[in-house]
Image (cartoon, rainbow, N blue to C red):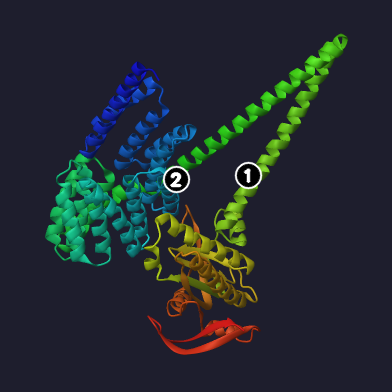
Amino acid sequence: MWPAHAAAQADVDASFRSYLDSAGSAENAGDYERANALLDHANDIALAARDVRKQARVIIRRGVITQRRGDFNKALMEFYAAMRLCEANDDQAGLAEVYNNIGSIHHYDKNFDKAGHYYALSMEIRDRTGTPFERAQLYNNFGALLEDRGRLDSALILYRRGLAIRLSQKDTSWIAVTYSHIGECLDKLGRLDSARHYLLESHRLIARTPNRFVRGNVNVQLGMNMLHSGNAASAIQYCSVALATARELRTLGLEQQACECLFQAYESAKRPFDALAMLQRYVVLRDSMFGQQLAKEITRVEMTHSFEREQLADSLVRVQEKREADIAYQERLSRERDQKRVFLFGVIAVTMLAVGLWSRLRYMRRSRNAIDHERQRSDKLLLNILPRTIAEELKQFGEAKARDVAGVSILFTDFEDFTPQSERMSAHELVAAINTCFKAFDAIVTRYGLEKIKTIGDAYMCAGGLPEPRTGSTRDTVLAALEMQAYMRMHAAERHAQGLPAFSMRAGIHTGPVVAGIVGDTKFQYDLWGDTVNIAARMESTGEVGRVNISEGTYELVKREPGLRFTVRGMVQVKGKGDMEMYYVERE
């Protein structure tokens, strides 16, 4: 690069960065119109320079502002637009940022599985090429995801990893954000004094920065902490400041949190009319941001994005096929022209007709195969979510009715000392370790003809005798549990031999009647209800690590099965149920 050219490029980069930084400052101050105007200038520079990576950065910043203002649907479209630019230019840093932001939208929408998927994609890139600052941001996001899933101790581990990085960099604004995360998590654990310490420190630090949005969030968290501590007056004071900030910034998410806090505070302070007003506004905001229509719109945007990517891939294939066919055709014509010039026009006519008919036939065959392939993919996906009979009922009638099923054997498993073990792993390693175990469990469940119901954090739930009662389902459930424990022992031995931490597990089974059906209209899930489910969970929690604990009802159904040996535990105290007879089962 010539010196003059290099100097001009440096000026372009500096001007672009200046506009982007100024837009970030305006965003933090809540002046979103000025932030977008500055991004317009940055985009003009990117377009003039034909720099696609710079264009992607502008689109990402617009998406963040749009998301902060509560328009998740539009923000998601902007993030997907940026993703296409980053993928086309192998922009790994841009992809990491896009994945993180898409994950945050699914996080707000409480689609925790998708949020975790996109956070993990981002973390994979950051682990390879990212800075400590970028990894700390993902620690906060993964921590918030675990917090929302009720894994509060695990969330604190990740928050503190992020805090160590922030403190080393002396980044006041992000230290304040991380303190607020820790404070909120401690508040949910009931450690109100410790929570208030972190929240007040966050409030003190954030007051030194222009980031009004974060300041509003911290005020809401302080208000909730005061409310939980019985100080409704202070709660009203903090949340009123947050509400005023949210309305000035026109950020619907922050306004919703402030209204929810004020509703509870006014209700606690015996101010019913004020409480009613806040409740009404909260409901309006909640339905606006997280209602069924928004969920459908987000799904539509994702499906449109996937369809466009498939269409692009198909178009490239068709163009390449046409190009190859044209080359072959021209070569054939040239040979025939040289060899049989006399019959040139007749040969061309016959050849064109044959090519046309052959192309038409091939097109019809490919279209039919493509339709069959997509139908098979759809059916396979549905069967991964629902039992076959339930899936067929849903496809035929558009719904599946809940039903009473007798003699269902429910198996619960849960990892022992999960939180201390997780402290020794990175977020990526932790997810990979759990996934390895659960994939092995899935294979065992399939082999014994059981139905996987769901996973909840590090817990796994499946059942035998669903969706219809089946002879021998209780025996198969017990054998599956024993095989899971055998796998966990083998897996732990392999990891210990490599110097890696490993999990051990409890398992419990109870047999009885349940109600089985589909939950929800979108992102539906086949689930079970009834006292049998609760008792099965108690069998797991009162068992020993490495063993399978069964109830008396399950024991009566399998006690004469060959190859099984039982240990009588006697009457064991069970929370909410009193004394219950239990047995340990193992192979002879």
- Horizontal side of residue 566 vs 414, given as left or right: right
- Horizontal side of residue 272 vs 292, given as left or right: left
Q: Secondary structure at mark 2?
A: helix
For mark 1, what is the residue?
A: 374
Q: For the residue marked with disc 2, what is the amino acid?
A: Lys
Q: Secondary structure at mark 1?
A: helix
Q: Quadrant of residue 445?
A: bottom right
Residue 115 point in image, percent of width and height: 41, 50
- Counting the numbered discs, the total is 2
For mark 2, what is the residue?
A: 296
Earlier in the chain: of badge 2 and badge 1, it is 2
Q: Looking at the image, which is closer to me, 365 or 340?
A: 340
Residue 60 in view here: yes
Residue 133 point in image, percent of width and height: 31, 45
Image quarter in which the N terminus is found? top left
Residue 396 point in image, percent of width and height: 61, 54
